[in-house]
């Protein structure tokens, strides 16, 4: 704890941290003051005058007055109580009577009850100005007291600046800044305004109306969000096995009382009529409902038959980065010990496999070098090929505030989206030219002496080779290769090079390329050249913004064809022996198949059974026609799913499973923190957790996987994997979040890595001298445009969850963004239906003109499988890890004719 300030409140001695307010001091003394314009997440405003106290004789608003050493505060005097009561009564009297009746759970109503203020009698009928245009956020301006909390939340926490106070004097109310209805405003539905509104003027529709963060809720379950990898701690308020509201936890280690549209609101899928509620078996070509026993027996017989015909390696499984660690652990254990194959992989393959490969080659561990909390202290941010404002909104919001307040910002992204609007330098490389760009930046670092010679001499290796290579990447040549002006390269390198403590954060714009692993390694070069790592005190390393809620965990748990739980190699006898000792069985020694190899083997007839657990491969893997062919050729396809999907259309057995709000376990977030997942609801009808399904299928094959509970499972994993040996459910229940490596229960998790040494074989950081090589696809006269695919804030991956609920009202279909010049050349206007063709397939999208794109480049997401985006993308993949080249596809456009 930092230095403390001692003072007296109503005669009581209290101590508060330096910089605290009198409100904090009053709270420390156990005194509750009314605080209608205050929220701990916000800078204090002092405008409502309801928290009045007397400090050394002067009457003042406690929330804006600093606690000074030795101050003498009174709060309890009758005159003060009267002043405060009058201030609240005055605010309440300006509101229509329904302020206290229709919003009975509001903070204002609570304060009025506490101070014995009764609502004024109803006189005139209440005017009705409600704005109910938005699916998740409703506004009743009549209830607004102009405290400004929502506006500050939107500006200072979320950074969207969507709200404003309009009108004058007592008539001032909040409104969307764009003037029209809320649904057409800039709002991204983080829910911050709903959570902070003290009067019920801003609410969410439905049962959660009036339920806000910071108030006690009798039936709430603390869990971790199951959408992206940020790892927001959420409190799910439940009644009658239904979600009333999902609130961001104020003490959430990563989100600190903030959330995004997905975690906060996108749970409509839970009660969708499409939810799979019983097993299905294909009979005469159609999927028909079946009982669990019939489905499991059929699956077990099918797996046995596949092994009998082709040996254990004729079976494979794709595990789910949406599922828990314990589920992933169990699935790989089933494959390795019951089937006896290493054919297990997860969607990290499509995503950040190049990060795991690149970062472990450079530093040792398959994760980011430092924690996000550290990176937030950086004075310079280099954000590369990531759009956190849309894809990791809570992190995006924190990075934006950092850039607005205290850090310089370099963004490297072909598109002008999100953080790029606030960048000091925005580098816009042609997609697929990262390696050249990073070498260009490194060239300037070296040429202008902005490196750390001591660190390079003592802790790194590969400098000579790199310097030789960098001679070929002066700014002028790099500009030719990448399309980034030479002066921007120099300016960016100087910002990064001269910063005291820079940090690098990056995303799929680095990994999903033909040379994705080289991209990660050559980006890591910049941090190594500067020795900019947390433990050196000269920066905060390099952090991948990993995607799925548990993609880090799925890989940590060994749902990979070459690695056991905790990253021991399947080919390393020592690692195998450790696992064999715990599992009591000999393990397969041959490296298993990666996802694209599984699909290839299926097409060739050597893979005879594929179990797909929560990945819509026919929608989200590249070149989707060929994926469908693979499934159709494979004699047995089992799919665990929440919903019918493109993939279930090709399945022989479909098993209905629970979603993240319906199960127990742990996830690992993007910066290696384990957090607990807890069931808030029971799964619908006959649906079971993936955990139970794996156990049941093992039992149907006559095997017992042990690991009766998720807690036992994580404990067993810790016995195999030293990295996780100190973790347990009870510890996480107690501590909230713990980062790996965590080798023992009495040691803290290591958020900052490599304090003593790098974990590469020679304990040094490895620079990479990989030369720039062009992407797999390039535009030509037949396919003149370059398509980049990625994400939108409104939907999540295959869209299976976000398309089933209110998000569909936020974005109803996929768009193709293109520059107005390209649109004009193709005679397209906003809203025109357009057919996109690549060398591999066709997609139908709606044109959207946007100067976020450079001419010659177009962009779309892949959240609506029926538009066919992944029939466009190619089989080109990272040469090291097989991660698909989703970011570069040559296409042409034609008008859609129906
Ligand atoms: N709303 C929402 N959030 C999500 C998801 C979602 O589907 N929807 N998915 C989750 C998942 S699984 C993941 S992995 C993460 C992904 O999160 P991000 O990595 O941020 O996602 P993308 O939008 O795919 O790609 C990031 C950026 O890379 C840029 N880019 C493309 N090519 C290049 C290049 O050659 N060089 C550079 N420097 N940049 C390039 C694109 O223009 C894009 O803005 O998001 C997670 N969060
Ligand atoms: N064109 C293009 N394609 C891409 C990408 C891109 O940038 N461009 N990005 C790629 C990336 S990074 C990723 S990670 C993949 C994601 O691709 P997927 O993993 O296929 O996408 P999701 O929609 O996240 O989830 C897959 C399925 O899991 C189901 N599901 C959810 N929770 C659970 C659960 O607990 N258990 C089970 N059994 N099922 C569950 C969902 O209903 C959904 O159908 O897409 C990749 N595809
Ligand atoms: Mo991902």
Image: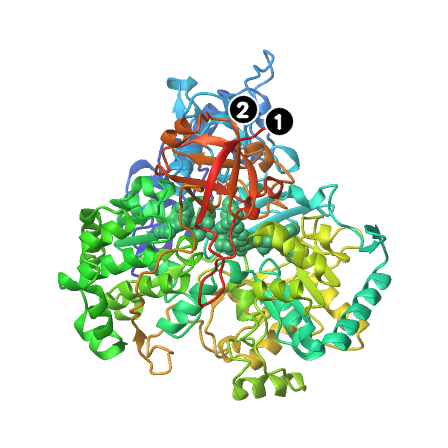
In x, y percent, where is residue 870?
A: 56, 48
Is 694 left, or right, of 534 in this rendering? right
Q: Residue furthest top?
A: 124
Residue placed at 80% from the left, 77% from the top? 702
Please say if 799 is above or below 300: above
Mark 1 residue element? helix
- Quick one: label 1, few (<14), some, or many (20+) residues within 10 Å? few
| Whole-number angstrom distance, CA of label 2 to CA of label 1 | 14 Å
Quadrant where the N terminus is found in the figure: bottom left
Residue placed at 63% from the left, 67% from the top? 601
Please say if 5 is above or below 466: above
- Quick one: label 2, few (<14), some, or many (20+) residues within 10 Å? many
Q: Residue furthest front?
A: 781
In x, y percent, where is residue 655?
A: 75, 57
Q: Is residue 27 visible?
A: no
Numbered label attached to residue 754: none
Residue placed at 55% from the left, 23% from the top? 131
Q: Quadrant of residue 147?
A: top left
Q: Which is more N-terminal, label 1 or label 2?
A: 1
Is 117 left, or right, of 147 in this rendering? right
Q: According to the image, label 1 marks what residue? A: 101
Q: Quadrant of residue 463?
A: bottom left
Residue 210 vs residue 678, the one in the foreground: 678
Residue 851 vs residue 632, the one in the foreground: 632
Q: Say whether mark 2 is within 8 Å of ligand 1.
A: no
Quadrant where the C terminus is found in the figure: top right
Is 819 left, or right, of 723 in this rendering? left
Q: According to the image, label 2 marks what residue? A: 140
In x, y percent, where is residue 378?
A: 28, 56
């Amino acid at each position: 704890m930092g230095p403390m300030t001692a003072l007296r409140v109503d005669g009581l001695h209290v101590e508060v941290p330096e910089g605290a307010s009198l409100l904090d001091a009053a709270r420390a003394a156990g005194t509750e003051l009314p605080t209608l314009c205050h929220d701990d997440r916000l800078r204090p405003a002092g405008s409502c005058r309801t928290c009045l106290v007397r400090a050394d004789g002067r009457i003042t608003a406690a929330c804006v007055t600093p606690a000074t050493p030795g101050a003498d505060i009174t709060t309890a005097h009758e005159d003060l109580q009267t002043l405060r009561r009058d201030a609240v009564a005055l605010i309440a009297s300006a509101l229509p009577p329904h302020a206290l009746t229709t919003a009975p759970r509001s903070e204002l109503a609570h304060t009025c009850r506490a101070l014995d203020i009764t609502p004024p009698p109803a006189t005139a009928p209440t005017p009705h100005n409600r704005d109910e245009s938005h699916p998740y956020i409703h506004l009743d301006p009549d209830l607004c007291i102009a405290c400004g909390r929502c506006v500050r939340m939107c500006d200072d926490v979320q950074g969207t600046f969507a709200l404003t106070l309009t009108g004058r004097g007592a008539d001032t109310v909040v409104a969307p800044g764009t003037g029209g209805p809320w649904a057409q405003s800039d709002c991204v539905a983080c829910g911050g305004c709903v959570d902070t509104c003290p009067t019920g003027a801003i609410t969410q529709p439905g049962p959660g109306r009036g339920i806000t963060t910071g108030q006690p809720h009798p039936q709430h379950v603390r869990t971790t969000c199951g959408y992206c990898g940020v790892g927001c701690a959420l409190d799910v308020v439940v009644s009658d096995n239904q979600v009333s509201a999902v609130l961001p936890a104020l003490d959430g280690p990563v989100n600190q009382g903030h959330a995004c549209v997905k975690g906060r609101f996108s749970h409509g899928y839970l009660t969708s009529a499409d939810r799979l509620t019983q097993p299905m078996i294909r009979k005469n070509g159609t999927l028909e409902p079946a009982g669990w026993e019939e489905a499991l027996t059929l699956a077990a017989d099918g797996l046995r038959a596949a092994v009998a015909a082709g040996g254990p390696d004729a079976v494979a499984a794709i595990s789910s980065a949406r599922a828990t660690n314990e589920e992933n652990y169990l699935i790989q254990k089933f494959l390795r010990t019951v089937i006896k194959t290493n054919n297990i992989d997860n969607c990290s393959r499509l995503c950040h496999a190049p990060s795991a490969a690149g970062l472990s080659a450079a530093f040792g561990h398959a994760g980011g070098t430092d924690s996000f909390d550290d990176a937030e202290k950086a004075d310079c941010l280099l954000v590369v090929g990531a759009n956190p404002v849309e894809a990791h909104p809570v992190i995006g919001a924190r990075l934006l505030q950092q850039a607005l307040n205290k850090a310089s910002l370099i963004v490297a992204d072909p598109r002008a989206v999100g953080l790029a609007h606030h960048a000091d330098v925005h580098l816009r490389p042609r997609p697929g030219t990262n390696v050249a760009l990073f070498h260009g930046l490194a060239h300037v670092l070296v040429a202008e002496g902005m490196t750390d010679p001591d660190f390079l001499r003592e802790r790194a290796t590969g400098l000579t080779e790199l310097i030789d290579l960098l001679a070929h990447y002066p700014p002028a040549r790099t500009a030719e290769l990448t399309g980034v002006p030479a002066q921007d390269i120099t300016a960016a390198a100087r910002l990064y090079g001269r910063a005291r403590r820079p940090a690098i954060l990056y995303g799929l714009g680095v990994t999903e390329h033909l040379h994705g692993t080289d991209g990660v390694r050559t980006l890591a070069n910049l941090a190594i050249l500067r020795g900019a790592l947390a433990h050196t005190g000269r920066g905060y390393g390099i952090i991948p913004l990993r995607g799925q809620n548990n993609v880090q965990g799925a890989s940590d748990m060994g749902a990979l064809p070459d690695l056991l739980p905790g990253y021991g190699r399947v080919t390393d006898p020592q690692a195998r022996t450790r696992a064999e000792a715990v599992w009591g069985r000999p393990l397969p020694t041959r490296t298993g198949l990666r996802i694209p190899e599984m699909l290839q083997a299926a097409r060739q007839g050597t893979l005879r059974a594929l179990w797909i657990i929560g990945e819509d491969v026919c929608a989200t893997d590249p070149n989707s026609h060929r994926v469908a062919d693979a499934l159709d050729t494979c004699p047995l396809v089992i799919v665990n799913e929440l919903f019918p999907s493109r993939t279930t259309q090709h399945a022989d057995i479909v098993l209905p499973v629970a979603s993240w709000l319906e199960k127990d376990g742990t996830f690992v977030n993007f910066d290696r923190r384990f957090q607990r997942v807890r069931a808030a609801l029971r799964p619908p009808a006959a649906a079971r957790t993936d955990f139970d399904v794996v156990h049941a299928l093992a039992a149907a094959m006559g095997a017992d996987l042990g690991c009766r509970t998720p807690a036992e499972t994580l404990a067993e994993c810790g016995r195999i994997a030293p990295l996780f040996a100190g973790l347990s459910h009870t510890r996480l229940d107690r501590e909230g979040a713990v980062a790996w490596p965590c080798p023992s229960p009495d040691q803290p998790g290591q958020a900052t890595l490599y304090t003593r040494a790098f974990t590469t074989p020679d304990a040094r950081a490895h620079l990479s001298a990989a030369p720039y090589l062009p992407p797999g696809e390039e535009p030509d006269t037949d396919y003149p445009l370059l398509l980049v695919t990625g994400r939108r804030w409104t939907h999540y991956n295959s869209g299976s969850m976000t398309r089933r609920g209110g998000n569909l009202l936020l974005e109803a279909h996929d768009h193709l963004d293109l520059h107005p010049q390209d649109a004009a050349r193709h005679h397209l206007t906003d809203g025109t239906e357009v057919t996109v063709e690549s060398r591999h397939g066709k997609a139908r999208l709606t044109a959207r003109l946007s100067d976020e794109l450079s001419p010659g480049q177009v962009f779309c997401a892949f959240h609506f499988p029926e538009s066919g985006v992944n029939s466009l993308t190619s089989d080109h993949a990272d040469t090291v890890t097989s991660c698909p080249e989703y970011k570069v596809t040559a296409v042409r456009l034609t008008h859609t004719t129906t």
